[in-house]
Amino acid sequence: MIKLNHITKTFQTPSLEVHACKDVTLDIGAGEIYGIIGFSGAGKSTLVRCINLLERPTSGQVSVDGIELTSLPEKELRAVRKKIGMIFQHFNLMRSRTVAQNIAYPLKGSGLSKEEINKKVNELLKLVDLEEKANVYPSQLSGGQKQRVAIARSLANDPKVLLCDEATSALDPQTTKSILRLLKHVNEQLGITIVLITHEMAVIKEICNRVAVMENGEVVEEGNILDVFSSPKQQVTRDFIDSTS
Ligand code: ADP
Ligand code: MG
C-alpha cells in the first residue's frame, strides 16, 4: 500500500543542513498497522509527512496504492491526497465550527449533496461514538473526544491510509487505550492501512503488526513486532524497551 524508496529529506537552515531522513526504504502492506518509533528529533514526523507529500522528499520516491506521488503534478496530487487521512497530537480542529461542521469540512467541493453530506457525517459520528456531540464546539470536548472528531474528519473522504502523528501523546493512558481501540476498529472494519508514529512503547505494543525504529533520520531496525522486541539488535531499541515496559 505504501512504498518509500530511498527517501531523504534535508532542511536548509541558515546555520546548517539538517538531515531529517536519510535513505529510508519501507514497504507497508495493505491492512497493516505499522508503527514508527523513535525519540524526539529522530525524523518520524518528517518521514510520515513525506508519505502524503506535505513534505517533499529531497530525493527518493513515494508510492501509495500503486501511484507514485513524487512524480504527480500538483493538481493530481491533491486528488490522491484525499485518500490519505492524517491525525495529529493536538487534534487540529477548527474551533469556530461545530463537531459536525468539522467532520463535514473535507467534503466541501466533493460534489455530494447536502443530504449526502449529512448522512456521511452521521455515519462518522456513530463510528466514533459522538452522536450526541454533533452540535457542540471543540472547546466543549475532552481531549479523547477531540481526537475522535479528528478521526471522523480524517475518514470523511474514505481514505485507504490513515497517518497518525503522536495521536495519543496528549492523552492519559485510559483515553489512549480507547483511541487505540477505535483505530484498531477502523483498521479491521474499514480495511484502512494505518501508520502510527509514537515515542511511546506501550502504543506500539498495543496495536502494531510491524515496527520501524528511527534514530538520527535513519530506520535502524525494522520488522515484526514480536521479533523486534524479543531480540532487539540496536541499542536504541533496547533503550525503548527498558524505558517504558
Ligand atoms: P520527530 O518527529 O521524530 O521528533 P522530526 O521529523 O520532527 O522528528 O524532526 C527531525 C529533525 O528535522 C529535527 O532535527 C528537526 O529539528 C528537523 N526539522 C524538522 N522540520 C524542520 C524544518 N521545517 N526546518 C528545519 N528543520 C526541521
Ligand atoms: Mg514528531
Image (cartoon, rainbow, N blue to C red):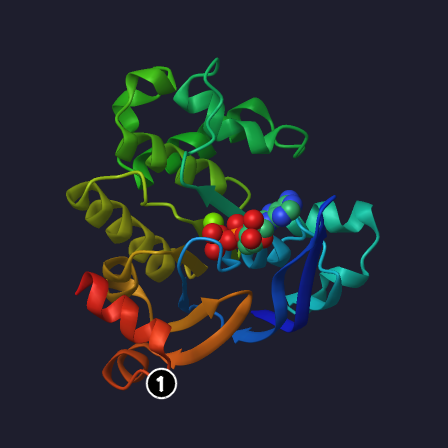
| Left or right of 218 in this view: 197 | left
Q: Front-most of 100 and 148?
A: 148
The answer as to whether callout 1 falls within 8 Å of ligand 1 is no
Most foreground residue, 148 or 241 = 241
Name the one closer to the observer, 84 or 135: 84
Q: Position of residue 201 (x, y in %)?
A: 27, 62
Name of the residue lying farthest toward the front:
15
Q: Is residue 163 visible?
A: no
Residue drawn at (50%, 58%) of the image: 44
Q: Is residue 243 above or below residue 158?
A: below
What residue type is disc 1 on?
Answer: Lys
Residue that mark 1 sits on = 233
Secondary-structure class at tag 1: loop
Quarter of the image for residue 21 reads: bottom right
Q: Position of residue 15 (x, y in %)?
A: 71, 47
Q: Position of residue 137 (x, y in %)?
A: 37, 15
Q: Is residue 87 visible?
A: yes
Q: Please identify the quadrant where the N terminus is shown.
A: bottom right
Q: Is residue 113 above or below residue 173?
A: above
Are there few (<14), some (14-19), or many (20+) residues within 10 Å of tag 1?
A: some
Residue at (80% x, 57% y) in the render: 72
Is 216 placed above or below 238 here? above
Horizontal relation, residue 245 to residue 3: left or right: left
Q: Nearer the viewer, residue 211 or 66?
A: 211
Q: Residue at x 26, y 39 (%)?
A: 171
Q: Residue at x 27, y 86 (%)?
A: 231
Count of numbered marks? 1
In this rendering, is residue 234 above or below 137?
Answer: below
Classify residue 238 by image quadrant. Answer: bottom left
